[in-house]
Every structure is written in structure tokens, then in C-alpha cells.
Amino acid sequence: MTESSPPIIVGTRGSELALVQATATEAALAAAFPDRKIIRKVIKTTGDRRTDVSLSEVAKAEGTFDKGVFIKEIEEALTAGEIDIAVHSLKDLPTVLGAQYVLAAVLERAPIRDVLVMRQPGGLAALPVGANVGTSSVRRAKQIQWLRPDVQVTDLRGNVPTRLRKLAEDGNHDAILLAEAGLLRLGFIPTEATGEFEEVTGISGLFVTRLDESEFFPAAGQGAIGLEVRAGDAPSRVFAESIGHRETWLRISAEREFLRLLDGGCHTPVGVYSSISGDEILLKARVFPEAGGTPTSGEVRGTDPFTLALELFNSLS
């Protein structure tokens, strides 16, 4: 490394999943820019420190949106020039960023489904009447209560391994809802399903059911790793864009634009997902009324992600 080639400093949360995502980003950067040293800076966020109360309560105390508690300190490090690229779980990033920041790229997306983890096999149908299901996501809570109105949903915080251990050991929950991508990246399940009801690797007595995204809609951007940079930092933007994945970018652009039009933050009970075949994007959404009741849903197809998002929004308005 010469004086003309300063290091690329990557900022990340310190959870096990965040570190796996940072490692993937660093590996891609190292392959694309072998003359650059890659440095990692781990940043503890408000959401990481406050696991004793719900995300909405933390957000209220901080004066921010629910999952903004996971990015505030990382964005502050960007502003201060302490890091060059911030690595996020994309679903934690608001659809509208501050003017000083830009989402520069996304890595190739992992599977987007949600999963139901239980202490016995059987999936949704096997949940006992009145079962207690843990999640910190309003979207997941609304959907499972829509599909199984009899179940009780309670707030469950903590990183992925912590939630799994709580389910296995404390007996307070019959099941929990998580993202398939997180379980994959941490090695708890294989890339390909081994059966309808799979055991969790490394934690005995837990079984996973991968929920079909056409029945249980994921969050916008779920499974994607987002790379955020300073708006005026052209070199860092080039670094990020150089390792970005085009098809994932098209899909998440449609999903996030729909959420923006809906004026929905991370707290909004809306599921949205996409797929792409050739040049055609399929975009679907399910929006739950704030006051409860039957959700509205729709789907559109086309080639331009922003036009698609507007068409879907208009069809549900």
C-alpha cells in the first residue's frame, strides 16, 4: 500500500450476523481492489445497547424510527470520516436517507423468506391454539395473526443466536419468527432445504419451517446487504458500486420505492417482495391497516423498478 492508496474503512455493528455481513463485504472489496488495505471498525449502536425494551420504545426515547436505532451511530461515523463504507442489513435502513448519505450498492441477495422456528416440527399448522410466538417485527406479528388469529405475539429482542437459545431454553415461547438469510449466514440452516421441517444446526430440539414468500410476505430489502457512503465521497461510492449486484439492485429499488410511496418506515406492517426473470420484475405487496383488519394486496410486472413501484402503489390506494 502506498500513500496514494489509503485503506478502505468499513463500519459495521458488532452482532454475529453483522460481522458475517462485514466479512462478505470486505472479501469482495479485497478481491476487487487488491492494492487496498481493508480496515474494519465495529460500532455499537443504540439498538445494540438497549435490548431490555421494544424497538418502538427505544425509538421513542431516541426520537427516531424503530430500526433507526441500529444505524444512527454508524451514520455519525460516516459523517465524521471515521469510516468510508457502512455495511447494513438493508431492511434496517430507512427508505429515505439524510441528504448527506447515499445507498451506493447492494451485494447479491440471500433468500428472502421468513422462517418459523419451533420446539417441535410441523410449521404454522402445528402451532397449538393460543401459541406464544416471539418477534420484534410488527410486519411478522400482523401476518402471523392474520394467518393464525388465535396465536399470541410477544416482543422478542436480541441477536439471532440469543433468540434461538431463548426459544430452546426458557419455555416462554412456542415459536419465534426470523429471517432465513440470517440463519443461513450464521450456519444454522443449509442453503437448500433438507426437508419440510429442518433441525437447527448446533441447537438441539429446534425445528425450522421456511415460509413461502407468496404466503408470508418478507420485508422490503430482506436478505440484502446495503452499502451506505457519504453523498459527496466519490471514491467510496466507486468502491461500493464495483462490488454491487445489478439484479438485486433492481429488485430492492422497486421494493424500497414502493415503501417510500407508502410513507412506510420499518414500523409499518407491510410485506413486499420481488423476483426477476430476464428483464421482467415481478413486484408484490401486502399492506395491513394500522387499525387492524384485512390487508390489501396486489402485484405488477414490468422492467422499470420505479414505474412498477408507482403502479403497485396506485393499485392499492
Image (cartoon, rainbow, N blue to C red):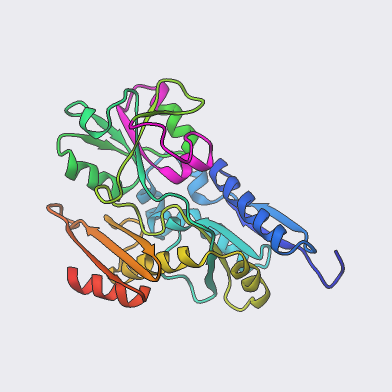
- Front residue (pair 250, 257): 250
Q: Is residue 92 above or below residue 128?
A: below
Q: Determine the residue positioned at 45% across, 46% down.
A: 181
Give the magenta range: 167-196
Q: Is residue 228 above or below residue 150?
A: below
Q: Determine the residue positioned at 67% across, 68% down.
A: 81
Query: Does the stretch in magenta take in 200?
Result: no
* Left or right of residue 58: residue 12: right
Residue 195 screen position, x and y as percent: 37, 31
- Front residue (pair 161, 183): 183
* Left or right of residue 78: residue 260: left
Q: Determine the residue positioned at 47% across, 43% down.
A: 182
- Front residue (pair 52, 310): 310
Tell me if residue 304 can be seen. yes
Residue 131 screen position, x and y as percent: 23, 29
Q: Residue furthest front?
A: 278
Q: How many marks?
A: 0
Quarter of the image for residue 283 reads bottom left
